[in-house]
Image (cartoon, grey):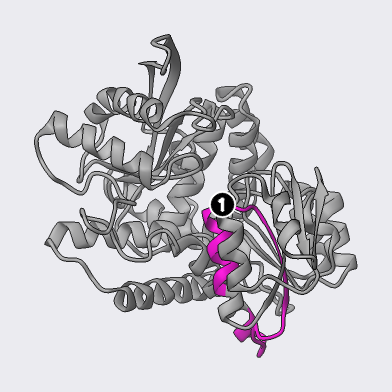
Amino acid sequence: MLNLTKFLGYVAEHNPNEPEFLQAVTEVVEDLIPYINNHHQDYETLKILERIAEPERVVSFRVTWLDDNNVIQVNRGYRVQMNSAIGPYKGGLRFSPTVNLSILKFLAFEQVFKNSLTGLPIGGGKGGSDFNPKGKSDMEIMRFCQSFMTELYRHIGAETDVPAGDIGVGGREIGYLYGQYKRIQNNFTGVLTGKGVHWGGSYIRPEATGYGLLYFVSCVLDNNNDTLEGKTIAISGAGNVAYYAAEKAILLGAKVITLSNSSGTLYDEDGFTLEKLHHLATLGRDIQEFTKKYKSATFYAEQKPWQFKCDIALPCATQNELDKNDAEILVENGCICVAEGANMPSTAEAVKVFHAAKIVYAPGKAANAGGVAVSGLEMSQNAIGQQWNTQKVDSQLKAIMENIHRTCIRYGKEECGYINYLRGANIGGFIKVAEAMKAQGVV
């Protein structure tokens, strides 16, 4: 019989000074070990958990580039290839000064389960660099991306590892990365997703994570004979995921009252409209400027959005942004659903608060899988040399999110009727990978 304390001790010993990775593993195996002990004891003999918590490969490399003053700069690049049991590695690249191996291993580990839940044949990986794109010129970003890809190209390929974007890596960066890969390899292949729609990309890829999040929330509410119409929603973040989550929420009849970034929270008591969102998108990081045009809005410097009364909370910024105190405030204010648009934005203590209060908590590995789902659809389009229209991609995205929701209910429904979406996602995402690892032998 597997023992939780013993297993976590083993992981901690083998991954010292990696708190984010240990947090991610703990969140998953707390659900998996009881399930394995009750249903699949052969997984213990096969060391499935030990193997799934160990990356198949970790690549670390130096990235040197010239800034606009012709000064040499040095950064570190990574690619964590976590698990390829059900398909080629798939996961984003993150450019941020906060990037380290612990964060990338946690993201890659989560990606394995998220990708499995989509039903698409893709494994899990993650990568990036401690490079900070903020304040850099286009030419500096291009030179960095070209240097980064000059090493990364050796380790990726359309049937091996297909990176995408993440924090700090948008359409511009994907373009520079893809251009360098194409120049080195002399072929046009679907080795990156998030490409421009005119050169191999998929429609609604930028919108996919935010739209998919709202499709998942709609499933949650529909399961309780409810809808998004008239619901008040608090959102953190002001980037791609937050923007399109807000857009879709508004289109579905909800009232979005907050968006935020690292400088503070923008609260609009009248609710954001599509017009307001479009204006906010022109402001860059200076979201406080929004209040000069719209008097219904107030900017709260260095504060989070969870203080405001809402029906639904959508953390869409970064890991561990929503702590125990925030969770208690949300519950006290009558919040009925927390669905994650970012990866592991709720601390372990916050999740315990949600479960104790029996409110819906939808983890990122389920709720924000829309991004990688459309990335997988982009891979399919590249493989057959076609480009599907917006309606077809959106329809398939919605169907994938609905299927993920059904999987969560199948494995997460408790005897009292409460749906533990975290447990459902963990077990539902794990089984497919575990069975593939079992079938493929000791590799």
Q: Quadrant of residue 297?
A: bottom right
Amino acid found under the numbered disc labelled 1: Gly
Residue to which mark 1 is pinned: 239
Q: Is residue 326 magenta?
A: no
Could you tell me which quadrant the C terminus lies in? Answer: top left
Residue 295 vs 320, above or below: the answer is below
- Which span of residues is magenta-colored? 221-248
Is residue 53 shown left or right of residue 316? left
Viewer-closest of 438 and 256 = 256
Asked if residue 237 is among those painted magenta in the image, a careful observer would answer yes
Of all residues, the one furthest to the top in this rendering is 71
> Could you tell me which residue is drawn at 21 percent across and 39 percent down?
157
Is the residue 440 above or below the residue 97 in the image? Answer: below
Q: Nearer the viewer, residue 430 or 138?
A: 138
Provide residue 188's location: percent of width, then percent of height.
13, 45
Residue at 49% x, 63% y is 428
Q: Is residue 34 visible?
A: yes
Q: Is residue 235 toward the left or the right of residue 241 in the image?
A: right
Residues 86 and 35: in front is 86
* Disc 1 residue crowd, few under 14, some 14–19, many 20+, Cα 10 Å: some
Residue 431 seen in the current view: no
Work out whether 64 lies above or below 105. Answer: above
Disc 1 secondary structure class: loop
Residue at the location (37% across, 25% down)? 144
Q: Residue furthest left?
A: 186
Measured from the top left, where is residue 186 in percent x and y? 9, 35
| Residue sitting at x 28%, y 50% | 87
- Outermost residue, bottom direction? 225
Outermost residue toward the right?
A: 332
Which percent across, then down, holds residue 110?
51, 47
Q: Is residue 434 above or below residue 295?
A: above
Point out residue 182 in the picture as x, y percentages from the top left corner: 16, 36
